[in-house]
Amino acid sequence: MRLVQFCHKGGEGSVRVGVEQAEGQGVIDLKAFDPSMPSTMREFLETGQKGMDCAKRALSSGQHVVSRSDIRLLSPVTGPEKVVCVGMNYKDHCLEQNAPIPNEPIIFSKFPSTITGPYDDIILPEESQEVDWEVELAFVIGRKGKHIKEEEALSYVAGFTVANDVSARDWQMKRNGKQWLLGKTFDTFCPLGPALVTTAALKDVHNLGIRCLVNGASVQDSNTNQLIFHIEKLVAWVSQFVTLCPGDVFLTGTPPGVGVFRNPPVFLKRGDVVECQIDEIGSIRNTVV
């Protein structure tokens, strides 16, 4: 299934959860199908299997379909408790910067306030001159857990989506004591979408083409088979430290081709259009303003 969060055009305050009939097709409004269903994805995921079963019934019914032209797609998840990020998690990205392959996952975070929609603008902050792109496979936690075993980890994942881990390299690499947080956490620095694709709907999440284009030119082109630490490992690893909750978002790292490691370096400027694509999941397209 392809789960989305949307609002009706002109009704921007009212968030709804829906199921896409197919990528880019009409969306079934879950609350219209079943008024007991909650209005946000985080609350929907908290209902567990009950919510997923309702979404399957709604999809089969073909009822309460709203046209894509009448709605605005939001980030599949808004207001998560956590946005967990993984650094240096593609073999080919480590090679491009002559960095050793990590022995254990490198974890950092973005504030949830960075999250923005799949087609919303990325705001270029006046405080940075070095804003860069990073296409990433993201996943969302579907049920609560701590000290999760690797072999059970995928059962805690609700689904997958596309992310852009927008990064201000000057603040990430030179300022703030070289702590990454501030450079990663300006407003709008985490576009997500277009849908939350359930695990069962993907053939092999560790073998998906992943790409980023800036103004139509390819800048990143790799495959999730380059991931050093797989989804199961990341869930198990992070759950040693914190309790994972429904709606928590994980960004799993970026492949090579980021602007900062080009010669000379290239950074985003106003008017640029950044498109991030992952096979079987979809693409997000954000204009820099």
Image (spheres, rainbow, N blue to C red):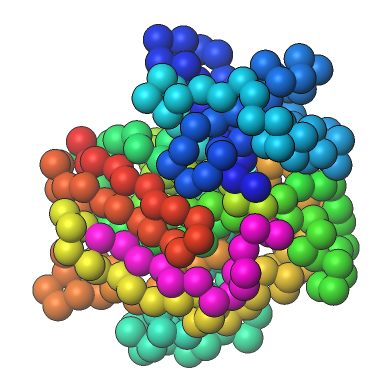
User: Which one is in front, 66 or 152?
Assistant: 66
User: Which one is in front, 97 or 115?
Assistant: 115
Give yes or no for residue 200 being in the magenta stretch: yes
Q: Report which quarter residue 126 is drawn in.
A: top left
Give yes or no for residue 259 being in the magenta stretch: no
Task: Determine if residue 32 is in view.
Answer: yes
Q: Position of residue 17 (x, y in %)?
A: 63, 28
User: Which one is in front, 86 or 56?
Assistant: 56
Horizontal arrangement in the rendering, residue 74 relative to residue 260 (left or right): right
Q: Where is residue 270 in the image (x, y as percent from the top left)?
A: 15, 42
**Total number of numbered discs in the rendering:** 0
Q: In which quarter of the image is the C terminus?
A: top left
Residue at horizontal 20%, vertical 75%?
Answer: 262
Magenta-highlighted residues: 199-213
Q: In this view, does 10 lie above or below 237?
A: above
Q: Report which quarter residue 16 is drawn in.
A: top right
Q: Report which quarter residue 160 is drawn in.
A: bottom right
Horizontal arrangement in the rendering, residue 28 relative to residue 274 (left or right): right
User: Which one is in front, 212 or 288?
Assistant: 212
Horizontal arrangement in the rendering, residue 266 relative to residue 147 (left or right): left
